[in-house]
Amino acid sequence: MNRIPQLVAHRGYRGRYPENTLRGIEAAVAAGASHVEFDVQLSADGVPVVLHDATLERTSDSVGDALSLSEAELVQVDVGEPKRFGARYLGTRLATLADVVSMLNRHPGVTVFVEAKRQSVERFGAEQVARSISSAMASACFQWALISFENNVLRCFRSATGQAIGWVMRDYDAPSRTAAEALAPEYLFVGERHLPEIEEPLWPGPWSWVIYGVDKIERALTLGMCGADFVETDEIGTLLEHPVFQGEENP
């Protein structure tokens, strides 16, 4: 029987909205996403904010080191991605993690992957990052898991909370497999571009596989047949509209 993977909205509905914003995340949920991923950095005063880069240039019209700014300063930054969208989303403010939790609490059926970014772990330490994110997520009424490229923050988080974790691998190779088996996360993430060209079953283990960087329906279905439980996409609405994900067509 062919296996149809579930879909994860990457940084919200990134294909059509500014990434990692309340507007984009809410749009993904409105499009039907049951799983959403977004990124978190810490402000200079230790507040988790929803932001991928450690700098502001790519997604805003501001410049500078985001990790050196306070929460009060960061929430004034317009992250409407003028380089991608022009003035369409002008006035879209950078959100705190608490802001996103408050919005997603209206959608308790959604599962969320919160990614702790490397720069914040290096700047503030794994324990502080894990503690700050856990605190901001304490009021969540939905299922969620902490994910990261950084094993140390995942270990700190799981030791303190016992909650689910997901390791984002930099490579799909033998050393990464050994590390994954030692960590035994509930979720194992890897970029589609890191997979071998030959289609073969993904490593078995106690984890669910999440393959990110997938925007084509044909590739999503192929990865499902290889063992992917989830594929993560910028085009959540487009893929969800396909008959396969509407239950109207066999792959």
Image (tube, rainbow, N blue to C red):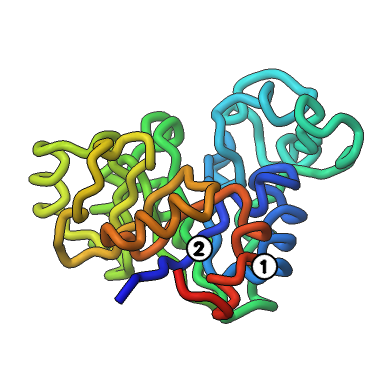
Give the class, few, some or many, for how many residues have Cα within 10 Å of label 2's Cα (few <14, many ≥20): many
Identify which amino acid the numbered label 2 is placed on. Leu
Q: Please, is residue 190 above or below residue 22 in the view?
A: above
Q: Please, is residue 136 above or below residue 124 in the view?
A: below
Residue at the image position 61 percent from the left and 46 percent from the top: 49
The answer to whether one can see residue 238 in this image is yes
- Give the image location of residue 46, x and y in percent: 53, 43
Q: Is residue 210 left or right of residue 234?
A: left
Ranked by sequence position, the earlier of labels 2 and 1 is: 2
Mark toward the viewer: 2 or 1: 2
Residue at the image position 21 percent from the left and 54 percent from the top: 202
Residue at the image position 58 percent from the left and 79 percent from the top: 248
Q: Distance between the Cα atoms at labels 2 and 1?
A: 12 Å
Q: Which residue is mark 1?
A: 29
Q: Which residue is mark 2?
A: 7
Label 1 SS: helix
- Give the image location of residue 108, x and y in percent: 59, 80
Total labels drawn: 2
